[in-house]
Image (spheres, coloured by chain):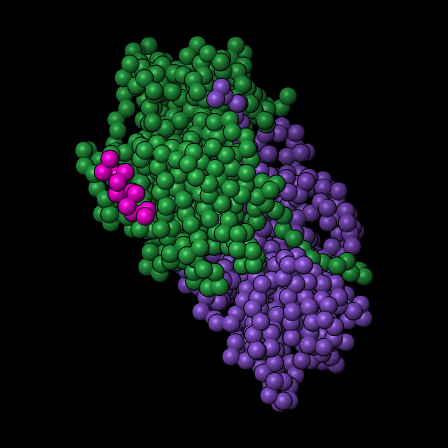
Chain colours: A purple, B green
Amino acid sequence: MQNLNIPESKKERVVIIGGGFGGLTIAKKLSTEEFQVVLIDKHNYHTFQPLLYQVATAGLEPDSIAYPLRKIFQKKKEFYFRVACAEEIDEEGGILRTDRGNVRFDHLIIATGSTTNYFGNVKIQSHSMPMKSLPEALDLRSLILQNFEASLLTSNLHERERLMNYVIVGGGPTGVELAGSLGELKLHVLPQDYPDLDFRRMSIHLLEASPRLLNGMSDRASELAKKGLEKLHVQVWTDTMVKDYDGEKVSTVNKELPASTLIWAAGVTGVIFKGIPDSSIERGRIKVDEFNRVNGMKNVYAVGDVAVMLTDKTPKGHPMVAPVAVQQGKLLTKNLIRQRKGQALKPFSYFNKGSMATIGRNKAVVDFAGMHIGGFAAWLIWMFIHLMELVGFRNRLVALVNWSTSYFSYDRGIRLIVRPFNRTTKKVEEDVHTNVPTDE
Amino acid sequence: MQNLNIPESKKERVVIIGGGFGGLTIAKKLSTEEFQVVLIDKHNYHTFQPLLYQVATAGLEPDSIAYPLRKIFQKKKEFYFRVACAEEIDEEGGILRTDRGNVRFDHLIIATGSTTNYFGNVKIQSHSMPMKSLPEALDLRSLILQNFEASLLTSNLHERERLMNYVIVGGGPTGVELAGSLGELKLHVLPQDYPDLDFRRMSIHLLEASPRLLNGMSDRASELAKKGLEKLHVQVWTDTMVKDYDGEKVSTVNKELPASTLIWAAGVTGVIFKGIPDSSIERGRIKVDEFNRVNGMKNVYAVGDVAVMLTDKTPKGHPMVAPVAVQQGKLLTKNLIRQRKGQALKPFSYFNKGSMATIGRNKAVVDFAGMHIGGFAAWLIWMFIHLMELVGFRNRLVALVNWSTSYFSYDRGIRLIVRPFNRTTKKVEEDVHTNVPTDE
């Protein structure tokens, strides 16, 4: 079997799986004076996931929210990055198997994050669109634009209605932000691109199974979000659990909605692979102790979304958000050093800095230190914080150019269907050439 | 059969196939006071083709060189755009058949441009990479980056050599610009991303069958281009015609070069579809008279790369470049109006404004009004003209941000493999999830 071709060193080797918020924090902070550090990821870039919905709704291009991992680590010595997908842990042998070959480890950190959870509903999964990765967000963007092109071609009003209806399932931050962004497209952008279409016929439905939106946030934020979305023509349906979807009609506990496009943002689950004992897995996430060590395993750790730390204080674990991953990553980095030095490890404790969600172009809701801020002020905070978090000066600058031109011109410049998406095959379509062979 | 759902009007209908330089010019200039104008294109965007090589070498993102066609025509009345691919002309019935339905026409303008010409060599075609469309440029970018990732994983020196060698066939502007851009990646960008790889082992070969580069330009430009490329470590082979390529080894009339990647920029041919008489086709292009009317057809015109205007002055037709398409488009627009008014038509005469090609980051060659300029001054002219031509203020601004950050930091920020490309299947690979089904 091929291996990942990483030279052996005298130092202990730490292998990190995943360059998301958790893995990236560890890879950046962990001293290569103490360890040889290996990072693997199936993509060659870090994705700023909170802004994926902007890519899906043609507000930002991929390069504004993604950053090449190699560039981040250009100056780090004794550090190795490989594009590979983890497949199995051989704990006893200290080997991680990947699709590109094996790699030996002394310490293994699982930071694979989470993916869309359909809760076993294969029918919904096969017809709906997820939005947890950059390619998925680009597919969704292509599909949204293709829907309007297709709407123009049909004289069948029922078909046109289905094509122009959007159902978003899940009233968390992703669902709320996506719905708001679609609302703005409907109100301000699409009618100019498609003057022949009657946009009163376009409906955006946001479905939430629980009694309110943004369950992780305050009642005030939840109310403000609902009002803000309704101003953007989003129809919010709480207490509305989805039962079935056949690609044409969404069935819920109390109504049916015709729609060709259902975006599933109702749940996530950890990305797990073989070799982790079943007893260490709880509802799709890996059980860890308060030092992020995987239950029942030695020298194997898990951080962020994929990990669930069950303690008396956190009987359900922590929320699956970026700050938890970053904070766990920072602490684990320190604990690995402490362990080497024979010092006592420090247990994890989550410091909640607050949470926020944006509603359309210039409104947001922010819960922070007991305050609940809404409207334009909250949006400025939201934008500032996201801009600051975007890795790299160039990304910040490009995102700022995009945001400001979009803000002042009420327009989005990037409605390109570069990779047409086939809803039926769920594949990207190849570029077509219509060329009759010539005499040459 | 479905039709393209375009309302009938009292005005004569002009259908334009293709939103490239020729079609876009006509669609913009043709007055909808006089005609109902319909534009179809297989993509929903106009591509600024002269900068495709920048997308392929991770210098620019697609949104900097492409512009949504709907946005250009937002304010034009009685104008209809449809995403569709032309399949057949029924001249007698005045019907164009497309993959999305039929459309009736009074006047039909074929502005489908050109595509890569392999001169019938199916084996070369199946193993090499073209670069004539945005998706093709993105595939090439993915493949280049994937090659370096793969080079890291192999200990086989022959395999690594093949992966790190690039052969570009065709010493026209595309081949020259691509080779220069790859040379800069080799010298300034990649060694920082891949400190473990020995970049002395990366070779860039530019193969040209004729005795010199840039055949359409002056001898002086050709010399300057060769010298400039050699400074960027590009190996230029003139008088070197490619005979065969099996995906691993390029065979030419006088040598063999090991390489996994061959980029074919050696020829283009018109994009033609059914319904045009064989007698009106000359070496893959449509024969037109000096008013751009297709030989032997009524009310059917062809402009730009797809058209070949054979006259005493131009026994081989005009060069396949953007200015010809734009000038033919402008004249045809005027002639259509003249025809309606019963006025005499004006014959086409090409005004050659000069030509240019860039060589790497800050050099270019320009032939203009008898002058032959090289070096940094030429590059400034090249950059200014390209920036001015980019449709839309936002595109210019984003391209400028990209160019300046790239110029001053000697770096390119967008080396993202967003859509991995499979060289064997020639398809974009789907996003992989490694997720073991959970108990839910």
Which residues are the magenta region? Answer: B219-230
Above or below A298: residue B431: above
Our reading of the magenta stretch's main secondary structure is: helix
Q: Quadrant of the C terminus of chain B?
A: bottom right
Instruction: Please state the horizontal and vertical placement of residue B236, each as a whole percent of the image.
Output: 35, 42
Q: Residue furthest bottom?
A: A343
Frontmost residue, A427 versus A85: A85
Residue B288 on the magenta segment: no
A360 with respect to B332 (left or right)? right
Q: Residue furthest left?
A: B370
Above or below A428: residue B164: below
Frontmost residue, B231 versus B427: B231
Which residue is painted at 36% across and 34% down in the image? Answer: B239
The quadrant holding residue A127 is top right
Which residue is painted at 77% across and 49% down in the image? Answer: A122
Q: Is residue A294 at all visible to an observer of this figure?
A: yes
Which residue is painted at 58% across and 40% down in the image? Answer: B426
